[in-house]
């Protein structure tokens, strides 16, 4: 069964986060990780930290399981320490 919702990539060293929408948590997290591994992530500051520090300090978590895509923006507006 697919889990859709808001996913957070957290840098455990700096506590900065990147939030994104996932239609399928497992597949979309793998896609984000693939982009980071290739050095092609759309968030330059997240990519920089990932390249410099490595995978070991990053965590992928489903923040909220929902089918409401508008929740991503609502959660982003309430969250601090976002990568920009």
Image: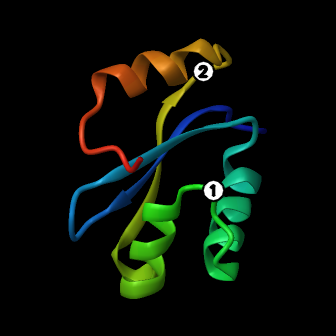
Instruction: Please indicate whether residue 65 sits to the left or right of residue 55 in the image.
Output: right
Name the mark nearer the viewer: 2 or 1.
1
The N terminus lies in which quarter of the figure? top right
Q: Between marks 2 and 1, how big is the CA–CA gap?
A: 24 Å
- The residue where tag 1 is placed is 42
Q: In this view, does 69 lie above or below 3?
A: above
**Residue at the image position 65 percent from the left and 60 percent from the top:** 32
**Residue at the image position 40 percent from the left and 69 percent from the top:** 58
SS label for mark 1? loop
Q: Where is residue 69 in the image (x, y as percent from the top left)?
A: 65, 18
**Residue at the image position 25 percent from the left and 45 percent from the top:** 81
Q: Which one is in front, 68 or 14?
A: 14
Q: Which one is in front, 32 or 62?
A: 32
Colour mapping = rainbow
SS label for mark 2? loop
Q: Pick whichever of labels 2 and 1 is earlier in the sequence.
A: 1
Q: Position of residue 38 (x, y in %)?
A: 70, 80
Q: In this view, does 24 lie above or below 50?
A: above
Instruction: Please indicate whether residue 34 sits to the left or right of residue 58 in the image.
Output: right
Q: Position of residue 63 (x, y in %)?
A: 44, 36
Q: Is residue 7 above or below residue 37?
A: above
Find residue 66 and name its label. Answer: 2
Q: Residues within 10 Å of mark 1 (few under 14, many from 20)?
A: few
Q: Can you tell which quarter of the image residue 15 is in?
A: bottom left
Q: Position of residue 30 (x, y in %)?
A: 70, 64
Q: Which one is in front, 69 or 52?
A: 52
């Amino acid at each position: 069964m697919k889990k859709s919702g808001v996913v957070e990539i957290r840098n455990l060293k700096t506590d900065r986060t990147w939030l994104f929408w996932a239609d399928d948590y497992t597949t979309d997290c793998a896609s984000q990780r693939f982009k980071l591994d290739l050095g092609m992530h759309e968030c330059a500051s997240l990519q920089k930290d990932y390249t410099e520090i490595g995978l070991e300090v990053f965590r992928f978590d489903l923040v909220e399981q929902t089918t409401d895509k508008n929740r991503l923006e609502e959660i982003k507006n309430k969250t601090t320490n976002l990568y920009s």
